[in-house]
Image (cartoon, helix red, strand yellow):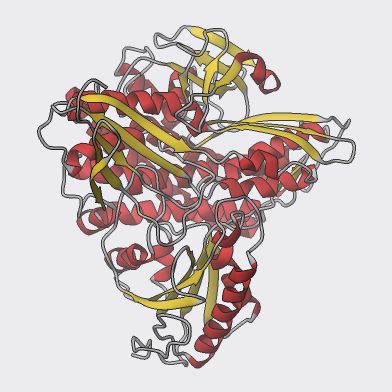
Amino acid sequence: MASTKQKRVIIEPVTRVEGHGKVSILLDEKNTVTQARLHIVEFRGFERFVQGRPFWEVPVLVQRLCGICPVSHHLAAAKAMDWIVGGEKLTPTAEKMRRLMHYGQTFQSHALHFFHLASPDLLFGFDADVAIRNVIGVAAKYPDLAVQGVMMRKYGQEIIKATAGKKIHGTGAIPGGINKNLSIAERDVFLKDIDQMLTWCRGALKVAVDYTTANLATAAPFGSFDSNHLSIVRKDGSMDLYDGNLRAIDAQGKKILDQVAPQDYYKVIAEEVRPWSYMKFPFIKSIGPKDGWYRVGPLARINTCDFIDTPEAEAARKEFMKLTDGKPNNITMAYHWARMIELLHSGEKIRDLLNDKDLQGTDLVTKGDRRDEGIAIVEAPRGTLFHHYRVNKDDQVVMANLIVSTTSNNEPMNRAVQKVAQDHISGKPEITEGLLNHIEVAIRAYDPCLSCATHALGRMPLEVILVDSTGTVIDRKRK
Amino acid sequence: MDAAKTGILVIGFGNPGRLDDGLGPALASRIEGMNLPNVTVDSDYQLTVEDAAEVARHDVVVFADADVGGPEPFYVRRLRPSGGTLSFSTHSVTPAAVLTLARELFRSEPQGFLLGIRGYEFNEFGERLSERAVENLEAAATYLAAALRTGRIEEIRADGDLPRGGSAKS
């Protein structure tokens, strides 16, 4: 840096099982942003932790990775272990029970994100008083909406409990199948409330659509940029959150890769290491690390799929695609709209599954020829989740590699931080909390789940540090 | 709190896969195993908004969590509803925020207590507690079991302290 004084602004939340991340923004004497980065301290120890453990324990163990999406890890690991036991072709009951678990997980996760994390910004404004711009403020001013968020989250959690056996640390999915079906009594409890849930889904979708369309002039450029998009899709091109093959498209919609089997993921995806970040940067091999990065998650999934196989979500997808004349939508804030389409889709899927008699079937497990390698992909709420394992003849795991969705979104989130810092903070005479919140709004759109750390009571959630060009701290603020 | 009343909820939260962060769920497991009358036990990785619905159904709620730097072996602190916070990544809420949500959304104001158990090791994967954490867990479980049986939960600031008021008896 040429300037004699520079400021470093750090936004550093430390969370429980989700992980540890911070934002650093370097400013010169005129408050011009010279650098903006999202640092994610990803704890990679898990892949070592599972080495030596029996493979059948892994679907349970991996849930320790994340308190927010343990079911995604549970299912991805179970799907990988299906290949180990030669049981990848599940019985109808097993596959549908797993799908119900997965859609329950997506339902509760999307509801939690929208009502708890996103709605305060959308309802009160990015610059609103921080004292009210939170879920408590939403509860006070929009109690009906807040109650809906709580009850939708609870509904999804109860589905997880009924399919996985427990709310946390579930054991439902096992290599080659599932260990329980859904009783009639359990089914009827969920059927009783599903229409109400779908009504609330439509309401949440409307909030997201109305916000985006009413604020399009500011929302469209906010943290936005052209990018590639990646997800799994079904063989017929339908969105499928539980199973499918990889598809990636560029910012104009041209296919980069399509129908790549999960077992071949390593042939098309690689990960780059950068010295300033613990988290890797995945990229599409055929394009290379510079331009091969991609987005995952709801926005990417809506962009990559040809259609959605539930009627209301499909109608909502078509409406969404009109915004960009059928081309891929690269608007970062459109993640919220896309997420609410998936919320509705998950609700529709849950309803359809609950009415499927296969859930009461008793053929739960299948097995075939044993293999020593298992690879699986699911679309977790936040995006594509890869699990890859090798096991030895003694059934012990000898290698594990996971690519979580927040890792895939590492580069996009950094670009969003840089864009918002340049557009909204650079050159401002005073860096207010509201301005800093603009950075967080852009990151929140991705719903990052910074897995693998911990915090417990007593850690400081946010720190702002002013340093001079020698690195000496000359001011520090915490909140 | 009157012991004859129903409705004490103990929620232990934390990640048992991250060493001493599992103190809260470990305490919940101990209490659950005692099958105490009028006591409901729950545990989770972290508190989230839907916990407000269950909290609202009880008269008294004890939130048990690991503490990275609090007094040994544990403390008990009266909680009041308070405002929420929002950060870019966390999906969890604080115990006080759960109480606020219970009040705002469900018109219920249970008495809330935070039981913070001192832990020491947090930064590795592993489903075990450190030796000192186990000792603190034993002390906390012994205290809480007695308190739940008698129906008196009181603030304790540090080891050896006598209760300093804040009695749950209303």
Residue drawn at point x = 69 percent, y = 40 percent: A48
- The spot of residue A146 in percent (x, y) is 31, 54
In this orientation, which residue lies closer to the viewer: B110 or B73? B73
- The x and y percentages for residue A332 are 33, 26
Specify the quadrant that holds the N terminus of chain A. Answer: top left
- Identify the residue at the far left of this view: A429
Locate residue B108 relative to residue B130 in the image: left or right. Answer: left
For residue A224, which quarter of the picture? Answer: top left
A339 displayed left or right of A167 = left
- Frontmost residue, B117 versus A355: B117
Q: Is residue B9 above or below residue A157?
A: below
Residue A175 falls left or right of residue A248: right
Residue A308 percent coordinates (x, y): 49, 25
Counting from the top left corner in percent of width and height, residue B16 is at 60, 58
- Write the residue at 64% across / 42% down: A46
Q: Count the labels in the image.
A: 0
Q: Is residue A111 visible?
A: yes
Q: Residue at x 90, y 36 (%)?
A: A393
Observer able to see residue A199: no
